[in-house]
Amino acid sequence: MMEKSLHMEKLRLGVCYYPEHWPEELWENDLKRMQDYGIEVVRIAEFAWNKFELEEGTFTYDFFDRFVTLANKIGMKMIFCTPSATPPAWLTKKYPEVLNAKKDGTVFRHGMRRHYNYNSPIYRKLVSAIVERLAAHYCLNEAIIGWQIDNELNCELDEFYSESDHTAFREYLKEKFGTLAALNKAMGTIFWNQTYTSWDQIFLTRSMIHKGGNNPHMALEEKRFFSHSAISFCKIQADIIRKYAPKGQFITTNGIFNHLDSHEMTDTVLDFITYDSYPDFGFDYETDPQSNGNLKDRYWSCHLSKVRSISPNFGIMEQQSGAGGWDFRMKQPMPKPGQMRLWTYQSVAHGADYISYFRWRTCWVGTEIYWHGLNDYSNMPNRRLGELERIRDEFQKLSCIAGSRYKAEIAFLKDYDNEWDGEQDQWHGPLDRFSAQGWFIAAQRNHTPMDYVYLTSSRMTTVDDLKKYKLLIYPHATILTRQTADLLKSYVEQGGQLIMGARTGYKDEFGRCPMRIMPGFASEICGVTVSDYTSLGPADDMEYAIWDEEMIEAPIFNDILEVRQGAEVLARFKGSYYNGLPALICNRIGNGKAYYFGAGFTARAAALFLKKLGLREPYGDIIRLPEEAELSIRSKNGKDYMFVLNYQPQKIKIALKIPATDLLTGNKVSGEEELYDYGVAVLVR
Ligand code: GAL
């Protein structure tokens, strides 16, 4: 597969700009000031449909032509966007079928954004028309370096229930299953008399007596369909732009959102993915259910790691630069002094080579008047702009970083089927999310860089892709196909280590539970069978297991294990009615080892695994860090660049066992050093 990565010869700064929000007399001053701050690229036009087509079929370009010409003259590059995220009022009034709808059929009205659906034929036609015109008109402009399609596909809402979606769903199912008999079988419609005898009886989920309770196999297929719809909508636009785009002009979109296989979208439609990073949202999260505390803004590194799994080098299309707030969601404070810079380096540390801030100036009208950009309403210098000056100067010293890759010895496996099935399966979903968090926290606090690897159809992951990792963690692959199991088995045979957990392997690709010994295809790999299982209910105490005399928490769901020949019991349950029965089994196959733990993973349990497997703190002999600091390594031409990020409002101590140079200051550092509040160091030996 061709790698879908951003290629930049140096770290670059950009900003989101809305010429349509400001008097034209301000443009030149804005652009020149941007340049003073080191900004080389502006993203424009993603919500500006009316500026091109105020009436159906009448296209005008003069407004953006004036802006593009000016920007070009000043030497500013641009990313041009397609405006499909905000269909104009004339359009939704004349063609209400383009609007999205709720499950109960209530239509979302005009007035916000993302109110459209992906499948309306008329919307696809009108979007194609405007994209065709924009691409033909702007593609050849040298100042335009790339295109962003739409804005944040599946943001705000990731479910679609308009009439057009119901119709398209039927077509999608016909294409996939061919016959009603095949569909009925796959979807288990024999249960509760749901058997379809004609395609027009089929609908996406509609209102049920309960909030859940609908056919779980259809619910899973529905998520696949939502993803398919978004990708095909994106592809229509990308195909048009590609007809006109000269070589080197890229096509991307921004953000990763639910019910969308962003890997498939990038692999099949885009040149690379970009992300919108708003770490202040991390403070919104409720108190962490895990005993190890809340990572807050540091949790954003989890999202950035997932972005990296799509495009090893990516861009940040929107990097938070101010307080966040809409009229109904005003919880995000102004970034503290140093925080905007910290978040910028958080993105860079994970592989971003392009950082574009949201937005140049805080808007003075509309829903986002409280969502702050680099400039305040007053347009006077402020401390965030001061921070930007510092970043500008530092980026000059970091050009060697561009194109370097995040380095990790362990990887967390994920796939969309399990993610989506887990929305319906209340045993699996919460368990999966809990363990994912546990492993992420453990990896963060133990300074063990971790990748995410998605097993998804567009990737065709091979053993060679996996072999670079010493450990793979695939905690609760409830849906586990023979093909994936074979891949994992080869990985272990060739020397890898694999950790799996409770609820593995009991479902097939449609989310059905076939008659077979659990954990299905994982049984042979891990040397286990599951003889009994139970969730831990509200009245149950936390379950534990004992591993070499150490306690290991065994929360949420327990698979009570039996060992298959040749495998070894490492830990036994302690507490419940299965006291003394196997909780953790290790199986040696070929040159590697597979572990099956009959529970979810707390951060403490995950840390214990890292310790026992000798994978904790792989850079511990070079640098010692307190738990509060994040360590990321980017590597190029055999050189490791160590990013140390302090998310705390106070200083922390770090200790270098081998002297290094901080690229940001040029200073030599060795022994014990202090890293100031919200501080960053980029160290190289
Ligand atoms: C992003 C979006 C931007 C802006 C920003 C702040 O999700 O792409 O257009 O809305 O959030 O709310």
Image (cartoon, rainbow, N blue to C red):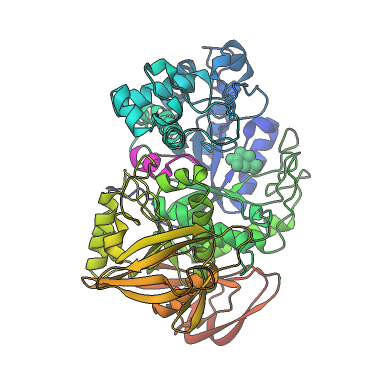
Location of residue 566 with respect to 283 vertically, above or below: below
Residue nearest the observer in this picture, 220 or 425: 425
Q: Is residue 6 visible?
A: no
- Residue 660 percent across, percent down from the top left: 48, 81
- Say which quadrant the C terminus sits in: bottom left
Location of residue 210 with respect to 409 vertically, above or below: above
Residue nearest the observer in this picture, 556 or 80: 556
Quadrant hosting ligand 1? top right
Quick one: which residue is furthest to the right in this view? 378
- Residue 233 percent across, percent down from the top left: 43, 28
Residue nearest the observer in this picture, 659 or 100: 100
- Residue 550 percent across, percent down from the top left: 49, 82
Q: Is residue 275 visible?
A: yes
Location of residue 522 with respect to 215 vertically, above or below: below
- Residue 317 percent across, percent down from the top left: 53, 46
Q: Bounds of the magenta span?
A: 249-268
Quadrant in the picture for residue 65? top right
Position of 132 compared to 339: left or right? left
